[in-house]
Amino acid sequence: MERVQRAAFPVILVYLWTMMILLGAVVLETFMVYPNIFHNPPRSLELAMEFLAIRGPADFFPPLGFLSWVGGAAAVILAWRIQPARSRLDGGSYSVW
């Protein structure tokens, strides 16, 4: 049981880090990029296309999205044997108690 917990901890941390990066990226894009792109539609769309010419969200989100799926599956598989974690994973955190 101790070995499973030792293996699960870094995997869960990597998954948490990935999800926090994705959350930060979505918040940044929602509150900073979108208002600037859609402020004055004809001109701002031209400016946005120039701004996102070298690197854009399409370069950033697919690899992190895949890492979030793989990390989430690995975290669930490794944490399933740990009873306190399993009760939260299978919906125990939504109970009324």
Image: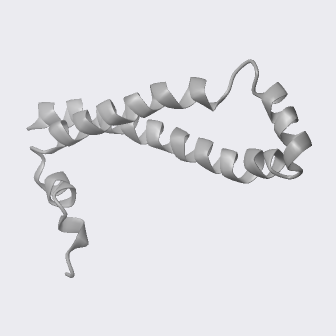
Which quadrant holds residue 79? top left
Name the residue at 46% across, 38% down: 17
Name the residue at 80% across, 44% down: 37
Instruction: Name the image colouring.
Output: one colour
Name the residue at 53% across, 32% down: 61
Front in this rendered view, residue 33 or 46:
46
Query: Residue 1 placed where, x, y %?
Result: 8, 38
Query: Residue 67 placed where, x, y %?
Result: 39, 29
Which quadrant holds residue 6? top left
Q: Is residue 26 above or below residue 61?
A: below
Query: Residue 5 placed where, x, y %?
Result: 18, 37
Q: Is residue 63 above or below residue 90?
A: above
In the image, is 90 to the left or to the right of 55?
Answer: left
Front in this rendered view, residue 35 or 25:
35
In the image, is 28 to the left or to the right of 43?
Answer: left
Quadrant assignment for the C terminus: bottom left
In the image, is 3 to the left or to the right of 94?
Answer: left
Query: Residue 31 placed where, x, y %?
Result: 72, 53
Name the residue at 75% across, 44% down: 33
